[in-house]
Image (cartoon, rainbow, N blue to C red):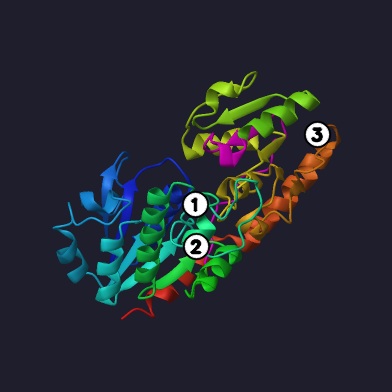
């Protein structure tokens, strides 16, 4: 089968990027793969033909830089979109009858900050101009984003949709889109190494609440290692900053920690960092939002009322081993990659 994957970028900077690479690696012996991307900031995956199509990187409706796209779609049997937000591209893929899309974030059903109100409460309404004024008070800006979200959503009606969590499936169902839950797969690491400190990994931005991790560690006297970049980095004092690090290094940092902290305040579509930590045998203290309940019921502790003094090495090891067993059962490549193949079989 000739499978064309479309993505806004070829990168190693986040969970969506790693999941795309994992999918490509699992498929390269099954299919003839082409990856078309809007921009390239990382090396090409082995066994995959990579072509730059600049217009794939546009987050708004635009025909610029898409001249090669029609030919690529024509020669493919399946076209699988990942983080493509240009409605023109989505409409073209949908019209081909070959489209599969993995919806990894909120931008096809929420014009604002991830179904999270300024108060921190979950948004329980659909995206209407009136409802979205709470998060997007500027009239002109709100009108543009609402229209853009509607255009993306309309295109999805003509494609097979995959989501990473049941929470995302519910959100799409509320706006009329059927989807199948196929979470990302994660390899389980070796025997845990329970260290002394905590790790926070991801973007250092307000909706991820990284300063809450700093406050928690300072309150209990636990050292904190921060892996990531963002606008709040300069406000995180008294921590070890590692910046963005590669996935193999991050997994080893997680393995050597006592705990991974996940204080996110927005509605996480899935929360892959938590699963990576559990796969390495490191427990997670999490503010469970959105799709995080796919994994946070095993090997994890609740954020509210967290007491780091109770997380002894013995307790951490117990939680970590339980987490590894859960990841092995729920998030194995063999089972989940075959489910993507089954979706491909319904196209056309």
Disc 3/disc 2 C-alpha distance (Å): 40 Å
Q: Mark 3 sits on what residue?
A: 308
Could you tell me if the residues under marks 3 and 2 are in contact, i.e. CB atoms within 8 Å?
A: no
Q: Mostly what secondary structure, the magenta segment?
A: loop
Disc number for residue 112: 1
Q: Is residue 152 visible?
A: yes
Q: Specify the quadrant that holds the N terminus.
A: bottom left
- Pointer 2: what residue? 127
- Position of 66 relative to 220 (above/below): below
Return the residue nearer the eye: 281 or 13.
13
Q: In this orientation, which residue lies closer to the viewer: 4 or 218?
A: 218
Determine crowd level at label 2: few under 14, some 14-19, many 20+ residues with C-alpha closer than 10 A: many
Q: Residue at x 74, y 52 (%)?
A: 322
Q: Is residue 73 or residue 276 the one in the foreground?
A: 73
* Image height of 174 relative to 18, above or below: below
For marks 3 and 1 on the same chain, the one whose residue lies earlier in the sequence: 1
Does the residue at mark 2 contact the one at mark 1 (Cβ under 8 Å)?
yes
User: How far from the left and from the top, in percent, is residue 155?
Assistant: 34, 69
Cα separation, mark 3 vs mark 1, equals 34 Å
Secondary structure, mark 1, is loop
**Highlighted magenta segment, given as a residue range:** 182-209
x%, y% of residue 234? 54, 21
The structure residue drawn at horizontal position 49% and vertical position 47%, both measured from the top left corner, is 137
Residue 206 in magenta stretch: yes
Query: At x 53% / y 61%, what residue is drawn?
Result: 164
């Amino acid at each position: 089968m000739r499978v064309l994957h479309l993505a806004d970028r070829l990168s190693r900077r986040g969970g969506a990027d790693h999941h795309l690479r994992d999918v490509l690696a699992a498929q390269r012996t099954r299919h003839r793969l082409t990856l078309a991307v809007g921009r390239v900031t990382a090396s090409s995956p082995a066994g995959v033909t990579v072509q730059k199509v600049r217009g794939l990187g546009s987050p708004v409706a635009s025909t610029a830089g898409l001249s090669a796209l029609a030919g690529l779609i024509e020669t493919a049997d399946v076209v699988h979109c990942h983080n493509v937000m240009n409605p023109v591209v989505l409409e073209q893929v949908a019209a081909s009858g070959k489209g599969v899309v993995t919806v990894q974030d909120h931008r096809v059903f929420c014009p604002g900050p991830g179904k999270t109100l300024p108060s921190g409460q979950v948004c329980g309404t659909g995206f209407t101009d009136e409802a979205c004024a709470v998060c997007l008070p500027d009239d002109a800006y709100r009108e543009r984003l609402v229209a853009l979200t509607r255009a993306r959503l309309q295109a999805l009606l003509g494609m097979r949709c995959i989501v990473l969590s049941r929470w995302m499936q519910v959100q799409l169902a509320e706006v009329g889109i059927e989807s199948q839950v196929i979470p990302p797969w994660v390899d389980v690491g070796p025997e845990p190494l329970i260290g002394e400190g905590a790790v926070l990994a991801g973007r250092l931005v307000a909706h991820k609440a990284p300063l809450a991790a700093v406050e928690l560690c300072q309150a209990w006297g636990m050292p904190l290692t921060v892996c990531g970049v963002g606008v709040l980095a300069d406000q995180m004092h008294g921590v070890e900053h590692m910046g963005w690090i590669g996935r193999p290094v991050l997994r080893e940092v997680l393995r050597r920690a006592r705990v991974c902290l996940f204080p996110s305040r927005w509605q996480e579509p899935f929360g892959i960092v938590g699963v990576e930590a559990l796969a390495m045998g490191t427990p997670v203290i999490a503010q469970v939002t959105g799709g995080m309940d796919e994994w946070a019921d095993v090997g994890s502790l609740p954020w509210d009322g967290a007491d780091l003094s109770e997380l002894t090495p013995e307790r951490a090891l117990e939680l970590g081993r339980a987490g590894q067993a859960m990841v092995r059962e729920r998030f194995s490549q063999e089972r989940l990659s075959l489910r993507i193949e089954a979706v491909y079989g319904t196209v056309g």
